[in-house]
Amino acid sequence: MTFDYHEPRSLAEALALLDRYGDDAHLMAGGTATVLLMRQGLLRPGHVIGLRAIDDLRGITPTRDGGLRIGATATLRAVERSPEARMYSPALTDAFASVATVRIRNQAMVGGNLAHADPAQDPPPMLAALNATVSIRSSRGERSLPIDELAVDHFTTSLAHDEIITGVVLPPIEPGSRETYLKFLPKTADDYATVSVAATLRFAPDGTIAETRIVLGAVGPTPIRARRVEDALRGQPPSRVRDALELVPDEVDPIDDLRGSAAYKREMARVWTGRALARVTR
Amino acid sequence: MSTHRLSFTLNGTKHELEVAADRLLIEVIRDDCGATGTKLGCAVGVCGACSVLVDGELLSACLLPAVFADGRRITTVEGLAKNDLTPLQDAFIREGGFQCGICTPGQLIAATALLSEQPRPDHEAIRTWMMGNLCRCTGYYGIERAIQKASGVGGQSPPNRL
Amino acid sequence: MKFTHTATVAAPRDKVWARIMDIPSAARCVPGVASVRASGKDKYQGTLAVQIGPVRLVLDGDFVMTARDEQAGTASLKADAKDSRVGGAIRATMDLALAEKEGQTEVKIATDLAVMGRLGEFGQAVIKRKADQLMGDFAECLARQVMTAR
């Protein structure tokens, strides 16, 4: 493993480095994933560009409309401890506090967590259930991407080589909305989930479900939106949840591993989606 | 391979050295600075044997690029005791908080970070926090008892005073 | 780890058989295969480049046809390949079975894959899914090839 390390002080400088080195460059935020992949010899970039010294990528700040912006180099622990994040949604705090151990959360950063595109990570399903958009910059300009469209496969995103995630923007939460994050951990508390479920739900004044978003982690190559379940529940009373849950096993695409067989994970996806929906309809 | 000038304090002593881009903090503190109290266990950030405090924050030295340490204050197990042991170290001895001892530097550092953040953690808080520090002798009861004993005593945390 | 893929090709069995037995050409149906050449009787050499996120693997290896029964429409293949930079290897056996039904041919490929060394550390899950994708693409491409060749 041999590479040059760069630590630009500004976004412009970082983008220029990316343009110069193309796909021989690898971006690094907190470095938890990058260091491991490099040490295993699986990742061999010629240039590593560290993003941690860039001021523009920092911070967790409420937006003017009542939403929340999380900078790409906010550590997972900073989100976990942020009063603004908790004020926005306690479920967001729960999801970030669920990641591995406090040591990892002190080092790992939000932008890196998203770019790594590990389908078993905790923050992406919660951010997706909260309808987040990812802010992306390149020397060609700026764009916003619904977080659903970021991960396209295991460890693979739709980002181009010259793009940097600058942050995540969460829209204001509509009054009456409820959110939850649940993680099924049959082995150890710092393990990856067998299945995780992030759910948000809002009732209409007549007591029917006006809107719900359900995103499952660790049961497919990317976080999975249970869209058919969402569609089945829209406009329906909460008594319909039980029937809708039958759709869950066909929404997910798990594989056999040490955390369970694919068939078991499909069943657990149904059970834990049920538990998540019980929390937000209670 | 690029090299980088680093300047940091390790247990209160200033170090200035030049490191290659691929070096990790655990290698620099053990091999370059000679502070071998911090152990390398799993080398993938899971076991907690390499726990260190960087500006008071608990981190895995086996996952941390050494370049990240520039300008920081690092505390390892060697930096805990001044003339006397800290109350936490004392409690580890009295309560049987270690057996073979290989995980102990990491356990002490992790518990120090816990007590500086939550001076009186309850049972659950101790377990949740210490969950990431593995003890292959499975001496967890003694470790938990020691932390409980030392909690609320104060004077645990040199990191913020260094 | 084991997986099975099937593809239906709108062509008679002998046509499909002939196509598959042209190993260097059939191998090009696996995305990422760079070169395949014969290295002996029923032996081939080749490279396969695979990208999983930021991880790029170049698998160099041998490919041997261990059994072939044209009458029954079955064949067995064994592949051994390694990535010397990463330090890992794969070993795969593939059992191929062709069956003709109403002028169409069903191609069934059963793969048993073992991943060794550092490649294994990357996560069986990821490797399995990638291998699954590759074999799926292979079966589809083969079907296309045969149909356009008709």
Image (cartoon, coloured by chain):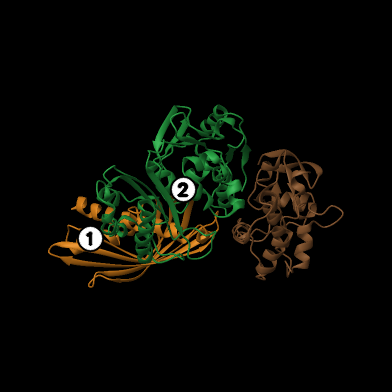
Chain colours: A green, B brown, C orange
**Residue under circle 1?**
C16
Q: Residue A261 falls in which quadrant of the image?
A: bottom left
Quarter of the image for the N terminus of chain C: give it.
bottom left
Location of residue A187 in the rendering, given as x and y in whole percent from the top left corner: 50, 65
* Residue C37 seen from this side: no
A121 and B15: which one is in front? Answer: A121
The image position of residue C122, as x and y in percent, is 51, 57
Place of residue B57 in the rendered image (x, y in percent of width and height, measured from the top left): 67, 47
Pick out the residue farthest to the left: C102
Which residue corresponds to the image point at 44% horizontal and 59% vertical from the top-left? C125
Depth check, mark 1 against mark 2: the one in front is 2
* A71 on left or right of C148: right
Residue B131 vertical placement versus A75 (above, below): below
Residue A91's disc number: 2
How many labels, in total?
2
Instruction: Tell me: residue A252, above or below residue A108.
Output: below
Label 2 neighbour load within 10 Å: few <14, some 14-19, many 20+: many
